[in-house]
Image (cartoon, helix red, strand yellow):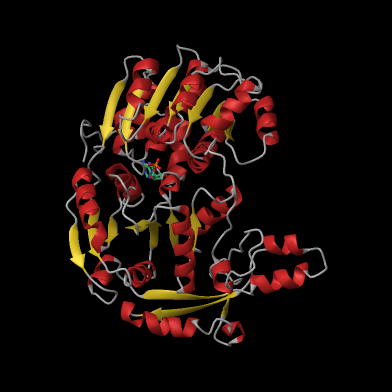
């Protein structure tokens, strides 16, 4: 899996990471450098421009966060209002938030201040954060440009710049903005660029903005990591959903991909209706709903996340045991990016692609281009292969939320408080049922079909510790959503800006 990295058993301290950072890392359980860190840290800590080719999950965040912090601490330049000293560009808000979460405890130990800048949230706190002075700004390009144009951010004091997931930035059409931003930083600033691939215009950035970059590749851009196993399940249209239900009702986190936002939304509803706690993630959701749903997936209250490609790259959740391409992606790069959400940080992972008769040819092309040879199995919902792919007892949750639509009707009936009710989290009840195998889904469904069984003595309160949290819809005007769907879904919003994603 490693292309150019020689085995390196050096510790973080031996690689040149300052002692205070080493101690903070150790406190977080990060003790031994991952290959991409061992490969890049000596050069990045020495101030060289570094081009890191590593997939997500390989540990690349620390590979750039550590040199940024160490270089800022060493340079000792004073923090000035509106003049950040380091800039980290990321394509999505989710990724920016994740990077910030990795930075914060480390920056605290050095007395450095870090902040995020991205769209979909108010300008005010970002403007005041910049005015207070930030050593490090973690930003999505669109909103950062807004602040540059308004004069709230000036990049002439930037000492080190990082471009994370540069290929994804290119895919999202951010490269012109990235170019303008990099042009506003001093030519002498150190630059680190991380990308899974070097095509799609990323090579142009490298030539234009990097000086004698040292290139380190960990994992080929084409081949997924070895611990990932790939399967294609050849299903009939009427067995597609039962197969999905069986796989996602198994223990562990599963991430399901659809091609369209509508597909993600509709599949989420269907899974919930079948008793699988699922949340959706796609570009039609408000930032609040995206954050909430991602949190529900991270904290385990929803074991299944149904997402579109655009959201795929922002999902950095460890412990995803199963990635399911419910719709095969259109091209092989998307297959690899989606699949890369599992088998993170050296863990094992299974990737399943569902294929119907009319998709056989496309899937064959896709897997060939992705460089994988999946095992293809023709099956229905009761096939033993499903238990092999997703072992363990199937668990179903009775989504007997207090009927949200009833609350709304009651709340809005002349009281004028309908809006508040719409935003309120459902505080319903859940009943867990288990089925040994997919063939028993039906019995689970029969129990679930009782729907209103929230008054049943067998129902467990969702509010209790250890119970799944519930999430109410915020879809304006929606009053027909079944109570079950309300329990684990978040609403859509119109007109999501592409900027700052
Ligand atoms: P990343 O590819 O940066 O998103 O990292 C993937 C996961 O690996 C994150 O949960 C990191 O906290 C974790 N991680 C990164 N480096 C190390 C390390 N050296 N030791 C243990 N865990 C790590």
Identify whether 429 is placed above or below 199: below
Which sits in the foreground, 486 or 356? Answer: 356
Q: Which quadrant of the structure image shows residue 162? A: top left
Which sits in the foreground, 215 or 353? Answer: 353
Which sits in the foreground, 309 or 470? Answer: 309
Where does the image place residue 172, in percent across and percent down from the top left? 44, 36
Residue 112 visible to an observer of this rendering: no
Q: Which quadrant of the structure image shows residue 416? A: bottom right
Residue depicted at 30% across the width and 29% down the height: 198
Q: Which quadrant of the structure image shows residue 376? A: bottom left
Q: Residue furthest right?
A: 415
Where does the image place residue 260, in percent across and percent down from the top left? 43, 53
Q: Which image quadrant: the N terminus? A: top left
Which sits in the foreground, 19 or 77? Answer: 77
Identify whether 43 is placed above or below 352: above
Where does the image place residue 452, in percent across and percent down from the top left? 59, 82
């Amino acid at each position: 899996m490693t292309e150019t990295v020689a085995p390196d058993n050096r510790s973080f301290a031996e690689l040149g990471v300052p002692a205070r950072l080493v101690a903070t890392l150790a406190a977080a359980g990060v003790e031994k450098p991952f290959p991409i860190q061992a490969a890049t840290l000596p050069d990045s800590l020495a101030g060289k421009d570094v081009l890191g080719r590593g997939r997500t999950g390989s540990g690349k965040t620390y590979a750039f966060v550590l040199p940024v912090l160490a270089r800022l601490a060493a340079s000792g330049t004073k923090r000035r209002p509106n003049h950040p000293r380091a800039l980290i560009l990321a394509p999505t808000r989710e990724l920016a938030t994740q990077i910030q979460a990795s930075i914060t405890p480390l920056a605290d130990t050095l007395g450095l201040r870090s902040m995020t800048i991205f769209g979909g949230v108010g300008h005010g706190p970002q403007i005041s954060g910049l005015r207070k002075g930030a050593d490090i700004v973690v930003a999505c390009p669109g909103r950062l440009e807004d602040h540059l144009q308004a004069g709230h951010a000036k990049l002439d004091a930037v000492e080190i710049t990082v471009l994370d997931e540069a290929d994804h930035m290119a895919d999202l059409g951010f490269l012109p903005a990235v170019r303008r931003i990099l042009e506003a930083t001093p030519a002498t600033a150190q630059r680190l660029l991380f990308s899974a691939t070097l095509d799609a215009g990323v090579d142009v950035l490298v030539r234009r903005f990097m000086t004698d970059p040292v290139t380190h590749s960990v994992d080929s851009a084409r081949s997924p990591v070895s611990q990932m196993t790939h399967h294609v399940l050849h299903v009939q249209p009427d067995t597609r959903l039962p197969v999905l239900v069986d796989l996602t009702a198994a223990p562990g986190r599963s991430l399901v991909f659809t091609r369209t936002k509508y597909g993600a939304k509709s599949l989420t509803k269907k899974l919930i209706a079948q008793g699988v706690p699922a949340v959706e993630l796609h570009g039609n959701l408000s930032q609040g709903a995206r954050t909430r749903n991602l949190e529900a997936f991270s904290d385990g209250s929803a074991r299944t996340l149904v997402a579109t490609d655009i959201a795929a790259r922002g999902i950095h959740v460890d412990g995803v045991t199963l990635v399911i391409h419910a719709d095969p992606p259109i091209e092989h790069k998307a297959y690899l990016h989606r699949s890369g959400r599992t088998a993170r940080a050296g863990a094992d992972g299974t990737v399943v692609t569902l294929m119907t008769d009319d998709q056989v040819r496309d899937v064959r092309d896709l897997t060939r281009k992705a460089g994988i040879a999946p095992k293809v199995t023709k099956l229905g919902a009761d096939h033993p292969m499903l238990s092999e792919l997703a072992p363990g007892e199937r668990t179903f949750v009775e989504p007997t939320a207090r009927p949200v639509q009833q609350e709304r009707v009651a709340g809005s009936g002349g009281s004028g408080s309908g809006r508040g009710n719409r935003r309120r989290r459902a505080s319903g009840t859940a009943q867990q049922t288990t089925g040994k195998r997919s063939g028993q889904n039906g019995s689970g469904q029969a129990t679930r079909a009782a729907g209103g069984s929230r008054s049943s003595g067998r129902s467990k309160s969702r509010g209790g510790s250890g119970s799944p949290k519930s999430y109410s819809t915020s879809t304006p005007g929606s009053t027909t959503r079944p109570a079950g769907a309300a329990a684990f879904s978040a609403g859509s919003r119109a007109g999501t800006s592409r900027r700052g994603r």
